[in-house]
Image: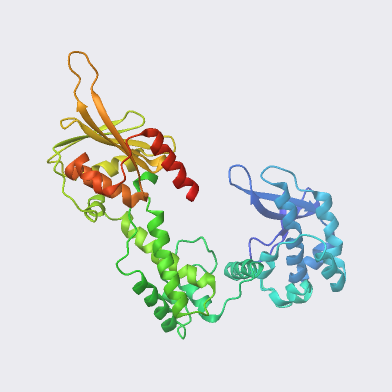
Amino acid sequence: MRDIVFARRSGWIPNVIREDGELKLMLGAGADANHEPRTFTFPIGEAHLAVIREDLARHLLLWSAVLPLCDAAGTRGRLDEDAAVALLDPVLLSAPEDVDALFRRIPWDRGRLVAHGADTRLLERGQVCAALRAATETSDGKRAQEDHAHRRRAERGVVLGPLDTALLKYTGQYLHGATAPKRIPGAVDPALLPEVVRVIATAEQACAGMRIGRDPRRGRRATDKRDWDRMAKAVETAVRRARPGLAEDAVRTVSFLMCSEAAERARNSPLDDDEEAVGGSARKTALSFTDDKGVERKWRRGHPRTATAEFWEFVGERSAGDNEVFTIEDEEMGEGVQLHFYADSIARVTTVRKGEAGSDPEYRVEYSLVDGMDGYRKLVSAFVSGGCAALGPYGSWIPDAADFERARRRRRAAG
């Protein structure tokens, strides 16, 4: 039999219950292996209940001190009841200076106290009792998040000015740096918004005309990391020049916004559009695409998609860590290219002599290094437009495999 003896308006603050005639503190914390909330209980006395009823600050301090014990229990372990009970008298019944001294020795959950109105400056001084003089039963989770973000930056030695803070809030990255950035003008102090808009305009001018292309080697919606880095560098250089006093966090959040928007435009553009930027119209009549797993796709003139778009779609669907070799073959002309994504290289293969009377055909194989996704786009487009003969200007073609491997190692060593 379980009855609630005392509960506050906030459902998360621990309740006092009577279970089988015994007073206990009951709190929810963490989750089990099925992601369901865990509930913990441990015995308390009448004197503890009296303080919990009358003193919100002590109630919150007890909660803050017990939560690390709940975290230690994990998804299936038992609460260390002895350790929890040992906190009752020191937290609830001791003098304020003794409570402050205790909290300098034990782990405790700062976020819970800050969410319920704790004065963060007094917490920093170790005056936890005084910090909770204006504590509230209602919780403000955003206040705790802001405090946590501020402390993370302080650990890195970052100090934000008003414009830095405004830019981070504008992009939605003030609380969580890993959050996808977006434009939230309503989150910025109206007095600072015009200044923020001017910084964003500087960034937009810096990357005008630049694009982030698709990178099917990494999946159907992946984008080119080199394009991203190039745009980020251009934006950051321009913003630093225009606003030399900005913190690095603010500069990076602006470049992150510009790059994220460009990448999203690329993801939402058809691959046909992506390849049109490379140039060239397919003059091949029929092509065969294969991957390293033996999967094949055919393309013929008259297909609703261009050959390059269909090939890169095939790569985006099939490319994986164990599937990084793709081939385009024109059987009619007896030529093809093999792309080695793991090695940033390509081979062009032409038939020198067809097999006759049971003899094997003779092929000429030449290798070239490839400079990123942009290099692959140009090579594929050139092959589709003009075959192996059109590839000459797009690489230094090496006929000897050993010579090519040495060239590849030299490039890797050069970084």
Asked if residue 201 can be seen in this view, the reply is yes
Determine the residue positioned at 29% across, 44% down.
Answer: 312
Position of residue 350 measured from the top left corner of the image (x, y, whole percent) = 23, 32
Within the image, what quadrant is residue 363 found in?
A: top left
Within the image, what quadrant is residue 362 found in?
A: top left
Decide which of 150, 245 is in the foreground and name it.
245
Q: Is residue 114 above or below residue 45?
A: below
Residue 275 appears left or right of 110: left
Residue 146 appears left or right of 42: left
Q: Is residue 173 above or below residue 295?
A: below
Determine the residue positioned at 86% across, 62% down.
Answer: 89
Q: Is residue 211 above or below residue 132?
A: above
Furthest residue in direction top, as rendered: 358
Decide which of 150, 324 is in the foreground and name it.
324
Asked if residue 182 can be seen in this view, the reply is no
Colouring convention used in this rendered image of the protein? rainbow
Q: How many marks?
A: 0
Position of residue 155 measured from the top left corner of the image (x, y, whole percent) = 66, 67
Determine the residue positioned at 44% across, 80% down.
Answer: 242
Furthest residue in direction bottom, as rendered: 191
Position of residue 141 measured from the top left corner of the image (x, y, whole percent) = 59, 67
Position of residue 238 measured from the top left corner of the image (x, y, whole percent) = 42, 74
